[in-house]
Image (cartoon, rainbow, N blue to C red):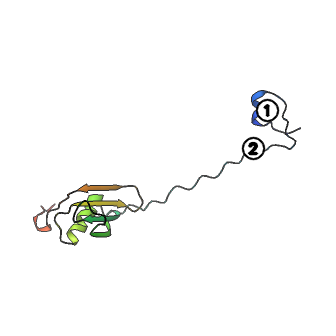
Amino acid sequence: MPTESCYPCQTYARACVLERETFPVERKRMKDAPVLLPVWPEGRWFDVALWSSWPSMFPRYTSYVQGASAFDAIAQLMRYYGLWKVAYASSRALDGSIIYRCYAPFVLPESETAPL
């Protein structure tokens, strides 16, 4: 006689008809949590793309940028290339936690920003 009854036999309250012993089902191990990039005091890494015209199939400028926020990464890349306005911008955190898109972003030149 089996040590445990199967599900249909338990449901219908009858003697188990299985010829072999039944064992508890082993659960599959859960995958480990995804590894997120640590947040440094200066920010995290973003994959940034800038479009000079919209709609367009491919961005004109792309780079990996480290920034405090998604828009900060976009602003840093725009300042690096000397752009004050683009048609469209996209920023994605490398760990996939943030995706930020904006239409017609602009930044002030470094000389016009107010000191903190």
Q: Which mark is residue 95?
A: none
Establish if 79 lies above or below 29.
below
- Residue at the extreme right of the image, as rendered: 1
SS for dot 2: loop
The structure residue drawn at horizontal position 77% and vertical position 27%, both measured from the top left corner, is 12
Q: Quadrant of the N terminus?
A: top right
**Quadrant position of the C terminus in the picture:** bottom left
Q: Is residue 84 left or right of residue 46?
A: left
Residue at point 75% right, 35% down?
7
Residue 14 appearing in the image: yes
Q: Is residue 69 visible?
A: no
Counting every numbered tag in the picture gives 2
> Which label sits on residue 24?
2
How much space separates mark 1 and mark 2, taking CA atoms?
15 Å
Q: Residue at x 84, y 43 (%)?
A: 21
Which comes before the other along the chain, label 1 or label 2? 1
Quarter of the view holding residue 4: top right
Q: Position of residue 64 (x, y in %)?
A: 34, 69
Given the image, on which type of amino acid does mark 1 rest?
A: Cys
- Of residues 12 and 64, the one nearer the viewer is 12
Residue 9: assigned label: 1
Q: Seen from this angle, which residue lies furthest top?
A: 13
Regarding mark 1 in the picture, which secondary structure is present there? helix
User: Crowdedness of circle 2 by 10 Å Cα count: few (<14), some, many (20+)?
Assistant: few
Q: Residues within 10 Å of mark 1 (few under 14, many from 20)?
A: some
Would you identify the image quadrant in which residue 107 lies?
Answer: bottom left
x then y, percent, for residue 61: 27, 70
